[in-house]
Amino acid sequence: MRPSHRLRRRLAYPIVTLCVAGVVFLFSRGQIASHAPAAPADYEAFAREVMREVRAGRPVPKSVDPAIQTVFDTMAPASVRADDGGELSFELIGPTDPGAGLPHIQSVVIRARDGAGVSLAISILGGRAEVVGVARVDRLSGGPQP
């Protein structure tokens, strides 16, 4: 056997092992996606679905914690929660916390006709949509207020 073949054979297993370990590590940290990222329209569509359920008198669907319902009830104005508030407008704001490295969590601001509103933090990861947070929306600035 030539020396180059021996060297290649001796290094093959450690290189393959290192590559497999790297892939497993990146998957475990969520840095390799197995699903395509959600489109902005997906976040708005999910927010519309959530508000349909809430306005029908049901709890916030697909929330990560039961406390989301309590926070939503205290943060969301009555005109947003009830049908008599009129038609709602939906606006995708973007990543909830851009510095956190979680691009799958986006904020959608929902406003009633009177300008009152609430912001939903929506996570769509791996094809699964969830409500992960709620924030009050100031009438003047329009931004979420924690």
Image (spheres, rainbow, N blue to C red):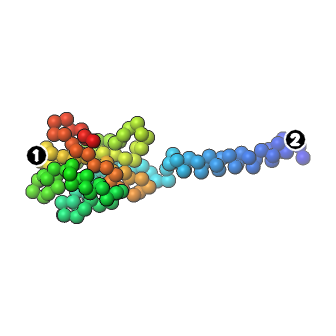
Q: Amino acid at mark 2?
A: Pro
Q: Position of residue 117 (x, y in %)?
A: 18, 46
Give the side of residue 4 with respect to residue 100, left or right: right
Is residue 1 visible to the viewer in this orientation of the structure?
A: yes
Give the quarter of the image for residue 126. bottom left
Q: Position of residue 95 (x, y in %)?
A: 35, 42
Give the side of residue 65 with respect to residue 56, left or right: right
Element at badge 2? Answer: helix
Q: Position of residue 54 (x, y in %)?
A: 21, 60
Q: Which residue is mark 2?
A: 3
The number of numbered badges drawn on the structure is: 2
Closer to the chain start, of discs 1 and 2, is: 2
Q: Position of residue 22 (x, y in %)?
A: 62, 46
Q: CA distance from mark 1 to mark 2?
A: 80 Å
Residues 14 and 68: in front is: 68
Q: Which mark is residue 114?
A: 1
Q: Amino acid at mark 1?
A: Asp
> Residue at position x 16%, y 36% from top?
140
Q: In the displayed image of the protein, which residue is found farthest to the right?
A: 1
